[in-house]
Amino acid sequence: MAKVTLSTLLEMKRSGEKFTCLTAYDSTHAHIVSSQGVDVILVGDSLGNVCQGQTSTVPVTVDDMCYHTRNVSMKAGDAMVMSDLPFASYTNEQQALTNSTRLMQAGAEMVKLEGEAWLVPIVSRLREQGIPSCVHLGLTPQSVHVLGGYKVQGRDQARANAMIEASIALEKAGAAMLLLECVPSALAREITRAVQIPVIGIGAGADTDGQVLVIYDMLDMTPGRKPKFVKNFMAASEGSVQQAVAAYVKEVKDGTFPGPEHGFE
Ligand code: KIV
């Protein structure tokens, strides 16, 4: 596999080939994920939940993200490395630039921020400085205390319209990618068609350009109830993490995953 860049993902969108993304938080998982052909590794602030044992991503700091980004980037191989800007680390353009610079210097090749239209000037400033950004819309876990829980977003027409308009405005401002979490599949399809940039989905149906899951969820290592959008890829993989990741890549590429049972109406 050649090094995955933004051009690779844009070409995949144009040609209709689905791309894959999984989270990783350390070099061992980064190596496994990359060697099985995953296109993008997300150093997600979900590390707050799955590595630190927190109940949300709110306590995660920029220092935490830099530490994990550095470890992942050591063994990311040809996969693109995308890292989350954590809670309240991008409240204005200067702060976003300072903290994104730290993530990029730790090995990130793209940063991810959660929000909607209010991110337009921030995304534009990052772009001017050579920092590609992915905007995470829909269920934005850093806002869990405002959203009142981990709930599907965009079921009402007003919210759906706001998300569509924000997506178009963010693309115009220079966003390199969008990520949609827990939105109705029909809305995700509409947004994916409305923009030229690649769109990744999680709990957003089968029609986004790429898919992402938290690696510990798809390996069935996360305790407690699993979100509806998760599939256990370990079940048919004879205890091999490598085989589970390879099965995920195959099923995203051939359109088997996600099935209708993993999405929302
Ligand atoms: O932090 C994370 O792992 C994420 C995914 C849920 C998309 O943002």
Image (tube, grey):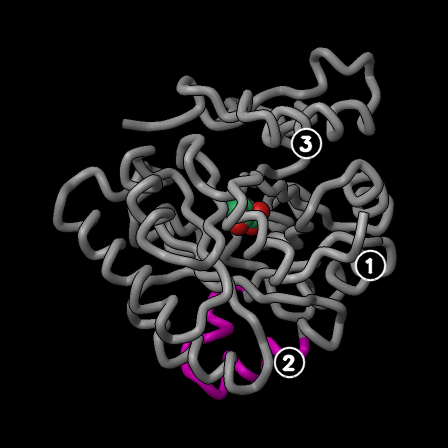
Observer-nearest of 62 and 210 = 210
Observer-nearest of 257 and 145 = 257
Tell whether 6 sits left or right of 180: right
Confirm or deny contact between disc 1 and disc 3 (CB under 8 A).
Answer: no
Q: Is residue 260 above or below residue 172?
A: above
Region rendered in magenta: 86-102
- Which residue lies under the disc numbered 2? 101
Q: Mark 2 near ligand 1 (CB under 8 Å)? A: no
Viewer-nearest of discs 2 and 3: 3
What element does badge 2 sit on? helix
Residue drawn at the location 50% of the way across and 65% of the way down? 176
Disc marking residue 63: none
| 90 in the magenta segment | yes
Q: How far apart are the alpha carbons under marks 2 and 3?
A: 31 Å
Tell whether 5 sits left or right of 213: right
- Which residue lies under the disc numbered 1? 71
- Which residue lies under the disc numbered 3? 249
Viewer-nearest of discs 1 and 3: 3
Q: Is residue 124 above or below residue 55?
A: below
Confirm or deny contact between disc 2 and disc 1 (CB under 8 A).
Answer: no
